[in-house]
């Protein structure tokens, strides 16, 4: 079996915040008594990311190998074949509440990124465990890149195929994580303390599937994403969800230079996916699109697959393969970019994943 190793140092994140044990009240059989959650001092404070790297490992730890075994078992359950998880040397510094590794992999020359600016694309899948198809989608992308290194070129591609392993590994996958939090409502947006719970109660009638958490950045899965973005500083983010059948954009206004470049990519991705529907959904308090796209002004694309039907995963990846290749190679490093806040306004009428 071909073993794929990409040059990358693993960032030490364990010292980023105070870690305190929490009692696990779940009845899931694979719950870990020694699971931890991170306490943040304020609701809007971001986790600091150290600038130093540790020496990269040559093989996965036993914990990650066990995780890959579990991933293979679930792929077998959905008749997807082997995941390929064991073919990669993963980067792992943080566990979920139930102790599952939250891993990522990088295609490209990490050492080069330390010296010169690079076009960095970040792809995240499995944010909501009951959205099954995006997980296979990310693994298909990884296998595609592994077999077609020319697509990578001089770019860097950071992929987290399963952001919320606890909810995916349940016997019946759920939108919320093991602690009952929708991690895509848990990002530390500026309006979180004021609006998150208020909107949850008013607009969603306190629907448990949409619970934003007790405070922003309370969940391991959210902290993982924030740290990954702060570390790699991607030029664009693609977050894959299901089942709304659309492409959505959050980020710099289309009247700004950076926004014009981002809009061009949005339209080209749609065209290369058979005129896939583009929908301008308003961003939501605590969402990735709001935090990364609106507040940090990173072009953030939400790709909503047509549904979570595990029978159709190959069809979906083939539908977007050309669009993904184009997005990876699309240079977002335009000079003289504006840094003003996006002109898009918040509205609570809608919320994509």
Image (tube, rainbow, N blue to C red):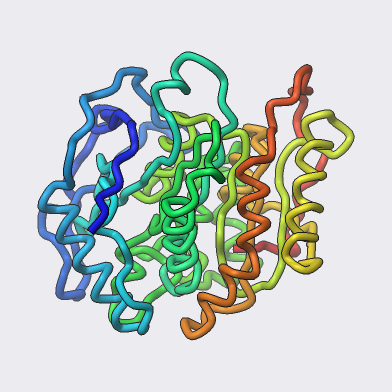
Q: At x 67% / y 56%, what residue is drawn?
A: 323
Percent of width and height locating residue 318 = 59, 69
Q: Nearer the viewer, residue 325 or 100?
A: 325
Task: State left or right for residue 152 relative to residue 179.
Answer: right
Q: Name which residue lies at 78% across and 52% down.
A: 268
Name the one closer to the observer, 54 or 287.
54
Q: For the point 60% across and 36% down, which residue is it?
A: 190
Which residue is depicted at the point 42% across and 58% down? Answer: 143
Q: Quadrant of the N terminus?
A: bottom left
Give above or below for 139 relative to 21. Answer: below
The image shows residue 160, relative to residue 10, as above or below, that is below
210 sits left or right of 245 in the view: left
Q: Answer with the quarter of the image where residue 65 lies.
A: bottom left
Residue extending farthest right: 255
What is the residue that sits farthest to the top in this orientation? 115
Name which quarter of the figure residue 269 lies in.
bottom right
From the viewer's perspective, tell me whether residue 281 is left or right of residue 96: right
Closest to the observer, 345 or 132:
132
Instruction: State the image coordinates of residue 272 (x, y, percent, origin top left).
Output: 75, 60
Q: Could one spot residue 78 in this view of the protein? A: yes
Residue 214 appears in the figure: no
Q: Position of residue 241 (x, y in %)?
A: 56, 65
Nearer to us in this view, 344 or 158: 158
Query: In what quadrant of the picture does the C terminus appear?
Result: bottom right
């Amino acid at each position: 079996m071909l073993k794929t190793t990409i040059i990358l140092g693993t960032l030490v994140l364990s010292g980023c915040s105070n870690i305190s044990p929490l009692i696990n009240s779940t009845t899931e059989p694979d719950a870990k008594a020694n699971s931890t959650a991170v306490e943040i001092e304020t609701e809007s404070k971001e986790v600091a990311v150290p600038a130093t790297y540790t020496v990269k490992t040559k093989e996965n730890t036993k914990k990650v190998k066990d995780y890959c075994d579990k991933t293979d078992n679930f792929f077998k359950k959905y008749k997807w074949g082997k995941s390929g998880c064991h073919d990669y040397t993963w980067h792992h510094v943080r566990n979920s509440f139930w102790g599952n590794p939250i891993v990522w992999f990088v295609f490209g020359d990490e050492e080069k990124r330390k010296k010169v600016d690079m076009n960095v694309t970040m792809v995240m899948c499995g944010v909501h465990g009951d959205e099954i198809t995006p997980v296979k989608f990310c693994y298909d992308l990884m296998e595609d890149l592994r077999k077609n290194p020319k697509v990578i070129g001089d770019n860097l591609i950071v992929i987290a195929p399963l952001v919320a392993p606890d909810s995916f590994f349940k016997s019946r996958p759920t939108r919320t994580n093991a602690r009952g939090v929708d991690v895509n409502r848990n990002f530390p947006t500026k309006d979180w303390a004021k609006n998150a719970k208020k909107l949850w109660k008013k607009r969603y009638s306190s629907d448990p599937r949409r619970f934003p958490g007790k405070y922003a950045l309370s969940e391991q899965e959210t902290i993982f994403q924030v740290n990954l973005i702060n570390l790699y500083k991607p030029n664009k983010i693609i977050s894959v969800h299901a089942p709304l059948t659309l492409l959505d954009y959050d980020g710099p206004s289309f009247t700004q230079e950076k926004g014009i470049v981002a809009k061009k990519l949005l339209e080209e991705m749609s065209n290369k996916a058979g005129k896939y529907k583009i929908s301008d959904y308003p961003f939501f308090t605590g969402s990735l699109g709001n935090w990364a796209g609106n507040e940090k002004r990173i072009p953030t694309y939400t790709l909503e697959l047509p549904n979570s039907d595990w029978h159709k995963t190959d069809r979906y990846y083939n539908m977007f393969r050309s669009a993904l290749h184009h997005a990876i190679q699309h240079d977002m490093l335009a000079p003289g970019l504006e840094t003003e806040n996006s002109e898009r306004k918040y509205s609570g009428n809608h919320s994509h994943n």
